[in-house]
Image (cartoon, helix red, strand yellow):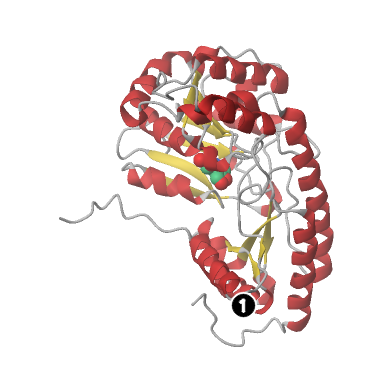
């Protein structure tokens, strides 16, 4: 037996760092985790309570494949609260995190061999999931001048069946404004390109609110999740919004692929919807961390940063220091016990010049991380001294 060709996807480089960070911790070092892409906070109090209350009272059997109606109606109400949009609850499909949403969306929209455009840099799993489904990811380079977001002129030269946009994006935290998203929506409609919008970081915004593609068109798939704003990564619960005439297709796929999303997590998610004020405290922390990061990184000598509009990442260009990003990250972990992510996870071509730093952790950790980063940059001569790696 041999594994299929399409199953040969790349590993996450960030996993190497997490391993190395764990090893450092096992030796008694205090590691500052700026590599992680998740909140350090708990799920909302009401979500945890709802689960405690129900766990001994219900067999927690399968639910309907699209998810419990109360949750779908609750999410429909969220669209009214957040964007003033009336989204029929029938168009909402609950998924096991947005990761399952990608599987459903890509399978529902594309036949094997289709070409799907994704921004480079971008979230690594887009590429790998597409590949595993016998689809062709097409990395489209973005520029810091365009906030690392796709513009119509970037997309136009490619022959595509689909386009995936993410705003705020991982790894840059930058957003598409209303006009830019509208141009992309208009262009994809005219060119018969299926549009997918990853809106997983909505709710984590600083100066302006993120625009949902649903404010512009019903002819798009939206992918979202309880992982980030609602701080529920491990609960594996998210949702899709699809055009009305696609609901049955996605429902049949969901029935067969997953039977249903985790029942217990649906109960928790329903209660989480009622906890927005609690979650907004986390956003205050991220906003404070963001400000500290922008000032602290500048003070440490990093000048090429595109300020993030949302999410909790800074994508930093370290090209001027003449060191490969993997080596830079390894050295930083070894010398100062600060874990960050080399850009190669996000951009195959240019990622050796960039790193991603997450500021989702507690403010005290961010302050300490910045102190160590400054000390590292002050003592490091910006010259390659030896070949460092994580082992
Ligand atoms: C842009 C983006 N989309 C999707 C995901 C997957 O999230 P989940 O499956 O937890 O909903 C992540 C995770 O970090 C992400 O950064």
Which quadrant, please, contains the N terminus?
bottom left
Q: Residue at x 60, y 36 (%)?
A: 200
Q: Residue at x 61, y 88 (%)?
A: 385
Q: Residue 90, how many percent across, how many down?
A: 50, 13
Q: Which residue is drawn at 66% across and 79% down?
A: 335
Q: In which quarter of the image is ligand 1?
A: top right
Looking at the picture, does residue 224 appear above or below residue 76?
below
Residue 355 seen in the current view: yes
Q: Residue 331, how many percent across, how many down?
A: 62, 77
Classify residue 279 by image quadrant: top right
Q: Residue 144, how many percent across, how many down?
A: 68, 53
Q: Residue 84, how many percent across, how many down?
A: 71, 16
Looking at the picture, does residue 334 appear above or below residue 262?
below
**Along the line of sight, which residue is nearer the eye, 301 or 13?**
13
Horizontal side of 86 relative to 108 (left or right) equals right
- Give the mark count: 1
Horizontal side of 387 relative to 216 (left or right) equals left
Looking at the picture, does residue 80 appear above or below residue 385?
above
Residue hosting label 1: 334
Residue 239 seen in the current view: no
Looking at the picture, does residue 357 appear above or below residue 280?
below
| Mark 1 secondary-structure assignment | helix
Check disc 1: other Cα within 10 Å, few if <14, some if 14-19, many if 20+: some
Q: Residue at x 64, y 28 (%)?
A: 272
């Amino acid at each position: 037996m041999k594994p299929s060709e399409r199953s040969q996807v790349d590993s996450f480089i960030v996993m190497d760092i997490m391993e190395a960070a764990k090893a450092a911790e096992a030796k008694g070092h205090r590691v500052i985790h700026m590599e992680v892409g998740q909140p350090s906070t708990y799920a909302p109090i009401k979500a945890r309570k709802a689960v405690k209350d129900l766990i001994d009272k219900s067999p927690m059997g399968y639910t309907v494949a699209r998810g419990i109606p109360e949750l779908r109606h609750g999410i429909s109400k969220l669209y009214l609260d957040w964007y003033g949009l009336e989204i029929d609850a029938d168009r909402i499909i609950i998924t096991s995190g947005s990761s399952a949403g990608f599987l459903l969306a890509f399978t529902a929209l594309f036949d094997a061999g289709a070409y799907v455009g994704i921004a480079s840099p971008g979230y690594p799993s887009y590429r790998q999931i597409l590949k595993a489904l016998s689809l062709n990811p097409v990395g489209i380079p973005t520029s810091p001048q365009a906030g690392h977001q796709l513009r119509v002129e970037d997309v136009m030269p490619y022959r595509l069946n689909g386009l995936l946009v993410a705003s705020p994006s991982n790894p840059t935290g930058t957003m598409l404004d209303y006009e830019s998203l509208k141009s992309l929506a208009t262009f994809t409609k005219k060119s018969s390109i299926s549009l997918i919008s990853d809106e997983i970081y909505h709710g984590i915004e600083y100066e302006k609110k993120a625009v949902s593609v649903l404010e512009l068109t019903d002819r798009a798939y939206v992918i979202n999740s309880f992982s980030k704003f609602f701080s529920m990564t491990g609960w594996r619960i998210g949702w899709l919004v699809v055009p009305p005439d696609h609901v049955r297709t996605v429902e049949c796929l969901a029935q067969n692929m997953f039977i249903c999303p985790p029942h217990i997590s649906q109960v928790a998610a329903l209660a989480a919807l009622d906890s927005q004020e609690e979650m907004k405290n986390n956003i205050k922390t991220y906003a404070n961390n963001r400000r500290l990061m922008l000032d602290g990184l500048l003070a440490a000598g990093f000048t090429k940063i595109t300020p993030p509009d949302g999410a909790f990442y800074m994508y930093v260009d370290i090209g001027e220091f003449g060191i490969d990003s993997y080596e830079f990250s390894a050295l930083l972990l070894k010398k100062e016990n600060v874990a960050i992510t080399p850009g190669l996870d996000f951009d195959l071509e240019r990622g050796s010049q960039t790193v991603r730093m997450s500021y989702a952790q507690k403010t005290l950790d961010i302050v300490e991380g910045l102190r160590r980063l400054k000390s590292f940059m002050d003592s490091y001569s910006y010259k390659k001294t030896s070949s460092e790696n994580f082992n």
